Image (cartoon, rainbow, N blue to C red):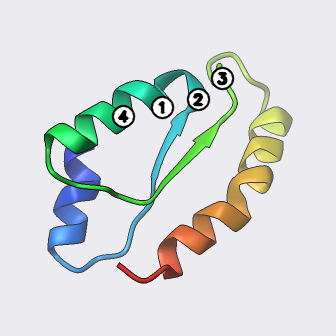
Amino acid sequence: MHDIIDLETRGVPGVFVATVEFKNAAEKQSRALGSDPAAVYVEHPIQDRTDDEMATIAEQALDALLAGLVQSP
């Protein structure tokens, strides 16, 4: 979270990515830090996924990631 906030303060577009398991914690932390970064949440868990499964997860998140990069602040 600190990294994406740092990028935003430098004017570098970015999107925070985490699994849905961490959505609540990420939202609480971003509020506590006074920020609202673009975020995309993907299915959980990530560990032990095959390369093909990871590629599918990435493909499913691509449109949301691109939208997060080009949205107006």
Q: Which mark is residue 63?
A: none
Compared with 42, 15 (above or below) is below
Residue 61 location (% of width, % of height): 70, 53
Residue shown at 85% from the left, 38% from the top? 52
Image marks 1 and 2: residues in contact by CB distance under 8 Å: yes
Using the numbered discs, state the Cα–Cα distance from disc 3 to disc 1 in whole angstroms.
11 Å
Q: Quadrant of residue 51?
A: top right
Residues 67 and 54: in front is: 67
Using the numbered discs, state the Cα–Cα distance from disc 1 to disc 2 in whole angstroms.
5 Å
Q: Earlier in the sequence, mark 2 or mark 4?
A: 2
Q: Mark 4 or mark 3, which is nearer to you?
A: 4
Using the numbered discs, state the Cα–Cα distance from disc 4 to disc 3 in whole angstroms.
14 Å
Q: Earlier in the sequence, mark 3 or mark 1?
A: 1
Residue 68 location (% of width, % of height): 52, 68
Three-letter code, disc 2: Val
Q: Quadrant of residue 41?
A: top right
Q: Dot 1 corresponds to which residue?
A: 23
Compared with 25, 61 (above or below) is below
Q: Dot 2 corresponds to which residue?
A: 20
Using the numbered discs, state the Cα–Cα distance from disc 2 to disc 4 in whole angstroms.
10 Å
Residue shown at 47% from the left, 25% from the top? 22
Residues 69 and 47: in front is: 69
Three-letter code, disc 4: Ala
Q: Dot 3 corresponds to which residue?
A: 44
